């Protein structure tokens, strides 16, 4: 009855990715899903690998790709809203491209699935992703740190526990992070405010390098990071996985687990993570007060019937971060004292205790997303999300006044609440056109206490967009247009008088691009786009002392919106032995907002403080990312990566500071033959050389940039095949030779060396009940 | 299918409502920023040990670091070949009545120390004249002696050294650092 069959229409074996006969864990399954009856492409069909509990969603052109796979036998579940799931067994020996045909019917079936939780992006911008083995290999790291090995990405750090991703030199207010499809809203303006996301929730992390403002709205000037949980699929019984990681440097550990099941028409998943680390150590000393604790959890439930599904998701993120005592400085003299000393003045001892100063962060997210499928007009998605972010920062100093001290209040308190709604209509492919139209709104409110550095404020914003892709043989053309409006009102006291200034901003974002995809050897993409962002509250109204940074910062309410014009091209070439990828970009930024040092320093009761003002200029960032792999023999591969960028302030004719230095990576790895229960044994050595950042100038910084450094890391890992499951483990040694170094983008470079050797053991145990 | 359409529309309306409703929430007016503990004023009182004459020298920046310039910033003028008792006052004058932080510093003497550093060539010599519970100096009371006429600077630094007080000016957080131009005449 109503049996829905999927059969493999044809299996076209292609050299889809990397080497053909290679036995490693970098195989890829790519393919396309079409509707047999209507002969239409099934955009957003789901392809799920049962054994690995991972999957992918087809894009607008019904194409999907799952990467980082090991050779072996897999069960693929292919499904689409309105169709039943079917199962296909494949023996994967090389990367393949598969064509699936689904019998699509209107009114059917108890078992249907498509997930709504996963955002995919396949456009004309350059993208990179972490999933499967590559994602397991960073388990336990913070989000910012986890992404820094991607070409073109860096991390801006405040010590070892606060790291923020940098895409092509841009970060904080200039990039967007989509946490399970919802734009993450916290106090992202601060360099010492890391993203409040548990990377363990992710099944796939996709990075879009470039201005993706049309789809994702304003602020996506440097790029977008999509943190996607695995799709909720009602097959495969009750199952889950436990992941644990232990770190030698901080004598710390992380454990994360999830369990998921279904009771038709519901599918649910529970997930949680615990992490604790002690004092971090450099090659020669401990960094006092750098212990860390984190506890996160999430729950998701999906209801699914016929052509409709709806999902409710809740996640909670909580961490307590000890801030390296010697980095919290009272004035410039303290800073200078720290500079002249090779070792920090406050000696550290190993402890799991967190003392002052520290940060305490809570982030709640509730999301509801509904998806309705119709054969005629396509798919409609409605997303509504509420998030609340509370950040408390405790200074070294307990207030001198006992009555105030007794209250135990933080020195700084921020609470920001955000509601986002989005309606999206993706129409079916027609006459080679596919695309979507969307509407989005945001409502935000910020409260600051115990400080006047950032005022209280309210934001309202809304946007409307359309994106269309035209497919012609191996070519696709993409064009999009978006309009955004933002209204904001600040509340603060100036000499006892309440001030409530309002601002309005509105602008268009657009993009036009093309991709050429020849499945044999080459891919080429080019994209020209423009994105914008409104000045952030700290840029408009910062007023005075920046806590712990020994600087006075002043906003400018007259700042204009910032705009980026970006040209991106990418080129990929592959043969069985060789893989080459080169990407180049030029990002011209109009009204680029930056902190300008202003002379003379301000005289205060705590000594002289440097003064910075937010100003605007026109800037240009030009950069190249290149990657090459070569197989010397089948299992023996060498890989090299290089990235560089040059950022100029065009009006003042100086370098834009705090930009990543050039980076060169070399990697060799060997994949052993399977023996007994040991499969996919892979060992590698990687060497990263970070050049000195010479493109800075004296007035813009307290100290010149640190010297170049070279770090070596080792890794080994395998799968152990046990009956129904494959347990995987890996051992990684970072900074193997315990090199003392300082990184330009780490604020702690003023005070201490970076981390010494760190050995990490990771184990993943999948289970079914 | 009709059912779903209805359900979907309902959900849409609901979300829209949430959006609109939350938009109408009362506007959040910030509390008056008064919890912040500021040090605004440093007063050095020099009492001549022979004549009993008292001279006070002040640094006063009533709105704290940043904002308006300091309103008072005196030059320390002392007689040559004389000796003085120094008494220090540290105040928060951004609130009314002013908060006397000197008392708090004295109470938490084991975590605080004032340092007096004079520039080379200035014939002013300062020594401690008080001690905390552990017998270490705090510096709220001090002795000063001058010899021949000379000019230079005197840097007065208040360090917060919780559990790490070690007589070292380099340790800890700086709460106060004022460089007074100083003339011995």
Image (cartoon, rainbow, N blue to C red):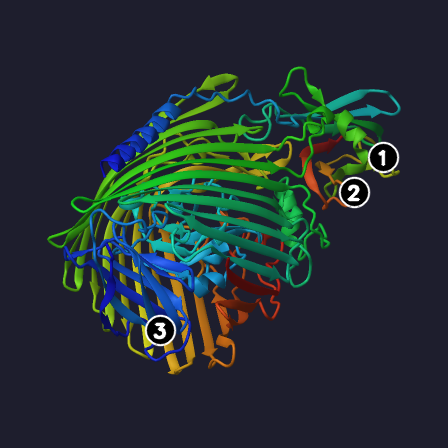
Mark number, residue B165:
2
Disc 1 to disc 2, how far (Cα)?
11 Å
Q: Is residue A713 left or right of residue A657?
A: right
Query: Mark 1: few, some, or many residues within 10 Å (few <14, many ≥20)?
Result: some
> Could one spot residue A237 in this view of the protein?
yes
Mark number, residue A700:
none
Disc 2 to disc 3, how far (Cα)?
66 Å
Which quadrant, please, contains the N terminus of chain A?
Answer: bottom left
Residue occupying the far front of the picture:
A1
Q: Is residue A511 above or below residue A247?
A: above
On the image, numbered disc 3 is attached to which residue? Answer: A92
Q: Tell me whether the residue at label 2 lies in contact with that at label 3, contact meaning CB atoms closer than 8 angstroms.
A: no
Q: Tell me whether the residue at label 1 lies in contact with that at label 2, contact meaning CB atoms closer than 8 angstroms.
A: yes
On the image, numbered disc 1 is attached to which residue? Answer: B132
Q: Total label count? A: 3
Q: Which element carries disc 2, helix, strand or loop?
A: loop
Residue occupying the far left of the picture:
A431
Query: Mark 3: few, some, or many residues within 10 Å (few <14, many ≥20)?
Result: some
Q: Is residue A250 left or right of residue A229?
A: right
> Could one spot residue A126 in this view of the protein?
no
Counting from the top left corner in percent of width and height, residue A84 is at 28, 54
Q: Which element carries disc 3, helix, strand or loop?
A: strand
Q: Chain of mark 3?
A: A
């Amino acid at each position: 009855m109503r049996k829905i069959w999927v059969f493999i229409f044809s299996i076209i074996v292609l050299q889809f990715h990397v080497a053909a006969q290679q036995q490693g864990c970098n195989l890829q399954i790519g393919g396309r899903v079409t509707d047999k009856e209507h002969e239409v492409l099934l955009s957003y069909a789901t392809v799920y690998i049962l054994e690995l509990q991972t999957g992918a969603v087809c894009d607008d052109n019904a194409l999907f790709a799952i990467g980082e796979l090991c050779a072996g036998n897999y069960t693929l579940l292919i499904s689409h809203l309105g169709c039943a799931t079917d199962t296909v067994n494949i023996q994967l020996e090389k990367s393949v491209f598969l064509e699936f045909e689904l019998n699509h019917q209107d009114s059917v079936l108890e078992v249907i699935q498509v997930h709504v939780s996963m955002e995919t992006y396949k456009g004309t911008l350059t993208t990179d992703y972490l999933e499967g083995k590559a994602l397991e290999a960073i388990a336990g790291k913070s989000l910012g740190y986890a992404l820094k090995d991607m070409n073109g990405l860096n991390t801006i750090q405040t010590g070892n526990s606060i790291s923020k991703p940098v895409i092509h030199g841009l970060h904080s207010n200039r990039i967007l992070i989509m946490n399970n499809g919802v734009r993450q809203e916290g106090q992202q303006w601060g360099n010492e405010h890391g993203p409040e996301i548990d990377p363990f929730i992710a099944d796939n992390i996709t990075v879009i390098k470039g201005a993706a403002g049309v789809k994702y709205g304003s602020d996506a000037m440097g790029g977008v990071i999509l943190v996607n949980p695995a799709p909720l699929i009602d097959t495969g019984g009750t199952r889950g996985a436990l992941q644990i990681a232990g770190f030698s440097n901080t004598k710390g550990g992380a454990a994360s687990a999830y369990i998921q099941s279904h009771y038709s028409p519901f599918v649910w998943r529970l997930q949680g993570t615990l992490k604790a680390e002690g004092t971090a150590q450099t090659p020669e000393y401990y960094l006092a007060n750098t212990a860390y604790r984190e506890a996160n959890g999430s729950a998701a439930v999906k209801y699914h019937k016929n052509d409709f599904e709806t999902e409710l998701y809740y996640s909670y993120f909580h961490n307590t971060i000890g801030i390296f005592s010697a980095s919290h400085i009272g004035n410039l003299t303290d800073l200078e004292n720290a500079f002249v000393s090779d070792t920090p003045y406050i000696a550290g001892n190993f402890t799991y205790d967190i003392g002052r100063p520290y940060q305490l962060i809570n982030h709640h997210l509730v999301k509801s997303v509904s998806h309705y499928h119709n054969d005629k007009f396509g798919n409609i998605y409605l997303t509504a999300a509420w998030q609340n972010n509370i950040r408390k920062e405790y200074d070294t100093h307990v207030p001198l006044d006992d009555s105030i001290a007794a209250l135990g209040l933080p020195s700084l308190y921020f609470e920001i609440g955000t509601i986002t709604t989005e309606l999206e209509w993706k129409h079916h492919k027609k006459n080679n056109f596919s695309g979507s139209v969307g509407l989005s709104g945001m409502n935000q409110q910020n409260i600051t206490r115990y400080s006047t550095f950032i005022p209280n404020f309210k934001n309202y914003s809304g946007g409307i967009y359309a994106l269309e892709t035209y497919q012609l043989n191996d070519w696709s053309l993409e064009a999009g247009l978006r309009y955004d409006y933002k209204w904001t009102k600040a509340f603060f006291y100036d000499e006892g008088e309440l001030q409530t200034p309002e601002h309005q901003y509105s602008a268009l974002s657009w993009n036009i691009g093309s991709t050429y995809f020849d499945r044999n050897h080459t891919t080429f993409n080019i994209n020209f786009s423009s994105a914008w962002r409104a000045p952030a509250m700290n840029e408009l109204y910062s007023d005075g002392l920046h806590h712990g940074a020994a600087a006075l910062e002043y906003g400018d309410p007259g700042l204009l919106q910032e705009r980026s014009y970006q040209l991106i091209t990418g080129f990929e070439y592959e043969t069985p032995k060789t893989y080459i990828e080169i990407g180049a970009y030029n990002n011209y930024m109009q009204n680029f907002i930056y902190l300008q040092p202003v002379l003379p320093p301000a005289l205060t009761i705590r000594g002289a403080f440097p003064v910075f003002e937010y100003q605007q200029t026109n800037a240009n960032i030009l950069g190249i990312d290149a990657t090459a792999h070569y197989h010397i023999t089948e299992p023996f591969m060498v890989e090299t990566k290089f990235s560089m960028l040059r950022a100029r302030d065009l009006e003042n004719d100086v370098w834009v500071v705090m930009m990543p230095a050039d980076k060169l990576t070399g990697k060799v790895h060997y994949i052993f033959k399977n023996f007994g229960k040991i499969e996919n044994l892979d060992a590698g050595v990687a060497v990263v050389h970070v050049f000195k950042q010479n493109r800075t100038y004296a007035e813009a910084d307290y100290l010149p940039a640190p010297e170049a450094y070279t770090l070596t890391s080792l890794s080994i890992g395998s799968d152990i095949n046990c009956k129904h499951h494959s347990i995987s483990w890996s051992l990684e040694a970072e900074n193997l030779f315990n090199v003392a170094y300082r990184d330009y983008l780490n604020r702690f470079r003023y005070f201490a060396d970076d981390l010494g050797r760190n050995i990490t053991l990771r184990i993943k145990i999948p289970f079914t009940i | 299918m009709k059912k779903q359409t209805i359900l979907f529309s309902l959900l849409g309306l609901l979300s829209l409502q949430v959006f609109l409703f939350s938009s109408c929430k009362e506007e959040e007016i910030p509390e008056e920023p008064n919890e912040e503990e500021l040090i605004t004023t440093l007063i050095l009182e020099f009492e001549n040990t022979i004549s009993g004459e008292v001279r006070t020298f002040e640094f006063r920046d009533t709105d704290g670091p940043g904002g308006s310039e300091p309103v008072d910033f005196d030059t320390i003028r002392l007689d040559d070949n004389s000796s003085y008792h120094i008494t220090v006052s540290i105040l928060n004058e951004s609130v009314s009545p002013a908060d006397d932080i000197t008392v708090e510093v004295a109470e938490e003497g084991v975590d605080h120390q004032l340092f007096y550093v004079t520039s080379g060539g200035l014939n002013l010599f300062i020594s401690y004249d008080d001690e905390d519970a552990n017998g270490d100096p705090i510096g709220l009371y001090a002795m000063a002696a001058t010899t021949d006429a000379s000019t230079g600077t005197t840097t007065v630094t208040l360090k917060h050294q919780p559990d790490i007080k070690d007589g070292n000016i380099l340790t800890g957080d700086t709460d106060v650092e004022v460089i007074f131009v100083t003339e011995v005449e």
